[in-house]
Amino acid sequence: MYNKKTIYANIQSAKYQRNSEAIVPKCLDCGLVGHYNKSYYKFSKYNPHTANYVGTSCKGNQNFKMKPEKKEVKQHKTNDTNAVLSTCKGVGHSSSQFPLCKKYLLSKIEVFNNNLGKPHQSFTRKIPFKSCIRNNETNIATTSSSANSQSTATIKSRIIRTCEDVRQLMFRAQVFVNYYILVHKDVIIPNFIFRQNFWYSICQLVNNCKVTNGTTLPSDIIFARNVFRTKYPSIIYKVELASGNSQCILEACTTVVTSYLKNMVELSKEMSLNNVTKIAKEFCYQMAILKSLPASPGKFVRFLAYILSEYDREHLAHNLYDVRRLPLPRLFAISPSPSFRWGFVIISVNYLCCFTKEKLFKGYNSQLNLFYKYFGFTGLVFKSIDDLRQNGLNDVLFANKIKSDGFTADFLFEKRRDTAL
């Protein structure tokens, strides 16, 4: 009883102290008078910490009402005619992303469009990995927490390790997702299965890690993972990912999402019209075209599963001596088959900065300098970095991206549409 009285007295004392406070200066965030900043209790949108927030370092998910308000405030600050940017002293903008700012940096797409013309074309050049690494920059400090800070590892061994981790995680993720799709083939599959964030969360489950973005997963995915894990324990591939490897997993997830979306379209294109006409007339009430298939791919899994079951029934009922129903319809797979082949990882500027401990530079030329520091271009008939810089007369520009499996390196370039190489 004494504790309750003490707590109640402290609450009343805090309320009295708050109500008796004098007016504080103008808020640094919203500009109103009456509170210090957005973390003060008198702020109109003050959100006190709850029990779920305690012990966590991540902010709560924003609701659908807060996001438009934040976007509107951000646009108001950016488009303020009286705003002054401290770096360039320019008036009329508060960010260097404003196109008229002196410090404005062109994006990579803008650089390609300005120098190569808008209809530019992508191509790659493959050379041995050993021939593109500079001799004086082959050793890079490892970033693993278990490794000594003085230990070193070559770029090649780091990329081979990354390729192995990405291959193991993506193969198991595809096997599990294909199992989940087959289990739920009689219902509409959620569309976020065909998104990058979903696959990255599945890779976290395969790695036996806590999912950082639970909103991208169906409500029953954890239960399905536990059931599948009980029967097939090898679905878990526990590995401590080095810094930068998550960026390669995101790139691999994008590739997998593209393959699943294209699989839906290709199945519809390759089917014979005679095999699906009757089923389409009986069960389909809306025309499915190539434009509508990627929009809601999960809706078509149920129909493809039904067509496949009819094909299976027809194959089982067919006798070898029966020639009246030939040829039989070709069976197909609803989901792409996972591949365990040794794959490539994409060395982007984000990945390169992670394990080289370099600063993440912005702008095309700064990122080009970083790649030129660690990779040699002499085997690609570029004698110096001046041949790669933008000058308005370029026929070829480096895309600041390399694909490698640790043994070969594919340099990605952009060229003019009418340029012959």
Image (cartoon, rainbow, N blue to C red):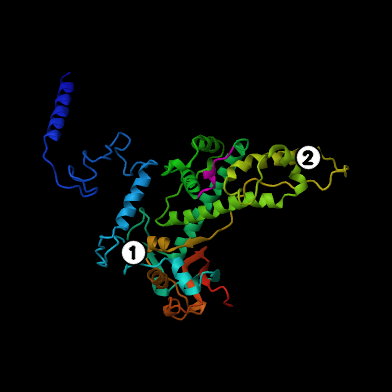
x 75%, y 48%: residue: 273
The image shows residue 38 at horizontal and vertical percentages of: 24, 44
The image shows residue 77 at horizontal and vertical percentages of: 29, 55
**Relative to residue 106, is residue 378 drawn left or right?**
right
Q: For mark 1, what is the residue? A: 359
User: Which amino acid, mark 1?
Assistant: Lys
**Relative to residue 279, is residue 256 drawn left or right?**
left
Q: Which residues make up the magenta segment? A: 188-195
For residue 354, which quarter of the picture? bottom left
Q: Say if residue 131 shows up in the picture.
A: no
x 81%, y 37%: residue: 317
For the C terminus, the quadrant is bottom right
For the N terminus, the quadrant is top left
Q: Residue furthest front?
A: 81
The answer to which of 223 and 148 lies nearer the viewer is 223
Q: Looking at the image, is 381 positioned above or below residue 333?
A: below
The answer to which of 377 and 32 lies nearer the viewer is 32
Specify which label sits upstream in the sequence, 1 or 2. 2
The answer to which of 137 and 301 lies nearer the viewer is 301
